[in-house]
C-alpha cells in the first residue's frame, strides 16, 4: 500500500467539520418532501432509522480506520482485507458514488439560486454551474489547508440558517399545539409499503461521512481523530435533521409538504407569515443557507474524492495522472481537474433523480464491504488503537443494513450500478499490479533470452578465437623447429 507524501494538517475540529460539511448539503432542504410524499408524518421514523444506520456504518468506519489509518478509506480497508482486486472494486464503487455526488451539487446549487433569480435560461444556468465548479477546483488545488479552512467556514455558516429555522419553528410549535397535532394526524396516512424507498432517499441525506477517512494521511493522529470526528459529526447532523423535520411536519401538512420544492423556505414563510417583512427576510436567510450548504458539501466531497483517486493511482490501480502532485501546492491537481470537469458534464446532461439513486447503490456497496472487512482485518492481525463494546455486533449490523439499502433500490438502479461496477474490471486489468508484474516477467524472460543468445555468441567467438590461436601456435612452433 502506498502512503502519500503530504504533511498532516487537519485537526479534530477540521475533520468534524469535514464530516458535518459532507453530510449536510442540499439534502436537508429537499429530502423532507420525498419522505412526506411516500410516508407522511411517519417519515420522521425513517429519519431516525436512517440516522441509526449512519451511526452503525460510521462506527464500522471507525474500527477500520483505527486498524488501517491510511489514505483511501474503504479502498484501503478492502485492499488490506482481501487484496488489490477487492480493494479496487470497493474503491471504484466509492469513487463512482462520490463522483456522482459531485455532479449532483452543481445542479442543486443552480436550482436554489433560481429561488432568487427564477428567469435564468439554460446558458445562464450552465454558466453558474461552471463558475461553481471552478471555485471548488481553485480551493482544492490551493492545498488541503486552504480547502479545509474553506470547508470550516462553509460548514459553520451553513448551520446558522438551520439553527434559525429550528428556533423560530419550536417557538411556533409551542404557541400552536392544536395546529401541530392536526398536522401530525394521522401519523401514517399512506401506510408502510413505501418505507424502504423513503429510507433510501432519506439515507442519502446522511451520506458523506465516509470521505473523512480518505485523507487519513493529512489528519493529525488519524487513529484517534477520525473515530471522534465521525461519531461527533453524525451526532450533530442527526440532531439537526430530527429537529428540522419535527418543525417542518409540525407547521405544514404532509400533503402540502410533499409538493414543496423548497420545504424549509416555505416553512419559514408560514412561521413568519404574520409579519411579511420578517417572512421575506427569513426566506432570504434560508435560501442563502441552502446555497452555502450545497457549496460546503461539494467542497468536502471534492477533498475526499481527489484523495481516493490519488490512492488508487498511487497503488497502480488507476491512471497515473490522478497521482500527479502539484510542485507548489502538493495536491493531486490533475485528478481534481479531471473529476470536476467530468462531473460538470454529467451535471449538465444527467438526470438528477437517477444520479441520486445510483449514488446510494454505490455507497451501500462500499458500506457493506467496509463493514465486512472489519472481521477480515482482525483475522489478519490488524491492531486497533482503541476498542469499544459491540465491536462484533456493529459490523454485522452494518452489513445487514447496507445490503437492505441495496435491495430497496429499483431494478433499473441496481442494473445500472452493476454495469458501472463491471466497467471497472477492464480498468483493473489495464492498471493492476498483476499486469505490471506480468510485463516485468516478460521483460525478464526477454532479457534472459538475450543473455543466452549473447552467451552463445560469446562461446562461438571464444571457440573460433581458440582455434585460430592453436593454428598460430602450430605454425610458430613448426617454424622455430625448422630453423634449428
Image: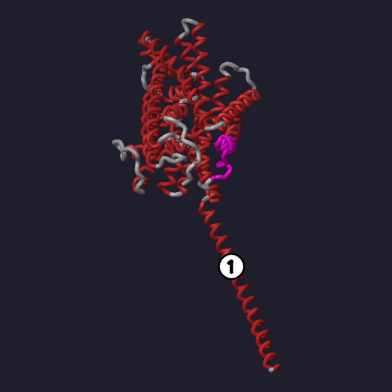
Residue 452, position as x, y percentages in the image = 58, 70
Q: From this viewpoint, which residue is outermost toward the front?
A: 484
Q: Is residue 162 above or below residue 224?
A: above
Q: Give the extent of the magenta segment.
A: 318-339
Q: Is residue 322 magenta?
A: yes
Counting other residues with Cα less than 10 Å from the Cα at mark 1, is it few (<14), some (14-19), or many (20 or more)? few
Q: Toward the viewer: 452 or 24?
A: 452
Residue 236, position as x, y percentages in the image = 39, 24
**What residue would you read off at disc 1?**
451
Q: Toward the viewer: 288 or 419?
A: 288
Q: Is residue 22 above or below residue 462?
A: above
Q: Is residue 345 magenta?
A: no
Residue 137, position as x, y percentages in the image = 58, 31
Residue 232, position as x, y percentages in the image = 38, 28
Left or right: 419, with 232 as reference point: right
Q: Is residue 354 visible?
A: no
Amino acid at each position: 500500500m502506498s502512503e502519500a507524501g503530504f504533511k498532516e494538517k487537519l485537526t479534530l475540529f477540521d475533520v468534524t467539520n469535514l464530516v458535518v460539511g459532507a453530510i449536510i448539503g442540499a439534502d436537508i432542504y429537499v429530502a423532507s418532501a420525498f419522505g412526506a410524499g411516500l410516508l407522511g408524518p411517519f417519515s420522521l421514523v425513517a429519519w431516525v432509522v436512517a440516522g441509526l444506520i449512519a451511526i452503525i456504518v460510521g462506527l464500522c468506519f471507525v474500527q477500520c480506520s483505527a486498524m488501517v489509518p491510511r489514505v483511501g478509506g474503504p479502498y484501503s480497508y478492502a485492499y488490506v482485507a482481501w487484496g488489490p482486486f477487492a480493494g479496487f472494486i470497493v474503491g471504484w464503487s466509492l469513487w463512482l458514488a462520490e463522483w456522482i455526488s459531485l455532479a449532483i451539487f452543481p445542479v442543486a446549487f443552480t436550482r436554489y439560486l433560481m429561488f432568487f433569480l427564477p428567469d435564468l435560461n439554460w446558458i445562464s444556468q450552465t454558466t453558474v454551474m461552471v463558475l461553481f465548479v471552478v471555485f471548488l477546483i481553485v480551493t482544492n488545488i490551493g492545498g488541503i489547508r486552504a480547502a479545509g479552512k474553506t470547508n470550516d467556514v462553509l460548514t459553520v455558516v451553513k448551520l446558522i440558517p438551520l439553527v434559525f429555522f429550528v428556533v423560530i419553528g419550536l417557538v411556533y410549535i409551542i404557541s400552536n399545539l392544536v395546529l401541530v397535532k392536526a398536522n401530525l394526524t394521522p401519523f401514517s396516512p399512506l401506510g408502510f409499503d413505501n418505507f424502504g424507498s423513503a429510507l433510501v432517499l432519506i439515507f442519502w441525506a446522511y451520506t458523506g461521512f465516509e470521505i473523512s477517512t480518505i485523507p487519513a494521511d493529512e489528519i493529525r493522529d488519524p487513529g484517534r481523530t477520525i473515530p471522534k470526528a465521525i461519531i461527533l459529526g453524525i451526532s450533530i447532523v442527526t440532531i439537526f435533521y430530527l429537529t428540522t423535520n419535527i418543525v417542518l411536519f409540525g407547521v405544514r401538512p404532509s400533503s402540502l409538504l410533499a409538493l414543496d420544492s423548497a420545504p424549509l423556505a416555505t416553512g419559514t414563510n408560514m412561521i413568519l407569515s404574520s409579519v411579511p417583512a420578517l417572512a421575506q427576510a427569513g426566506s432570504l436567510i434560508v435560501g442563502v443557507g441552502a446555497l452555502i450548504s450545497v457549496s460546503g458539501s461539494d467542497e468536502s466531497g471534492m477533498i475526499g474524492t481527489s484523495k481516493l483517486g490519488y490512492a488508487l493511482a498511487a497503488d497502480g490501480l488507476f491512471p497515473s495522472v490522478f497521482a500527479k502532485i502539484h510542485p507548489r501546492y502538493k495536491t493531486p491537481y490533475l485528478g481534481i481537474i479531471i473529476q470536476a470537469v467530468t462531473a460538470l458534464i454529467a451535471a449538465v446532461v444527467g438526470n438528477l433523480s437517477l444520479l441520486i439513486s445510483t449514488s446510494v447503490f454505490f455507497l451501500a456497496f462500499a458500506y457493506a464491504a467496509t463493514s465486512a472487512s472489519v472481521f477480515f482485518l482482525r483475522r489478519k492481525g490488524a491492531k486497533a488503537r482503541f476498542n469499544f463494546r459491540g465491536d462484533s455486533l456493529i459490523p454485522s449490523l452494518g452489513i445487514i443494513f447496507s445490503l437492505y439499502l441495496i435491495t430497496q433500490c429499483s431494478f433499473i438502479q441496481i442494473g445500472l450500478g452493476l454495469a458501472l461496477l463491471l466497467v471497472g474490471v477492464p480498468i483493473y486489468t489495464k492498471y493492476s499490479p498483476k499486469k505490471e508484474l506480468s510485463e516485468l516477467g516478460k521483460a525478464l524472460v526477454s532479457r534472459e533470452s538475450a543473455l543466452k543468445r549473447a552467451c552463445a555468441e560469446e562461446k562461438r567467438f571464444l571457440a573460433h578465437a581458440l582455434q585460430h590461436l592453436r593454428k598460430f601456435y602450430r605454425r610458430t612452433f613448426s617454424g622455430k623447429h625448422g630453423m634449428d
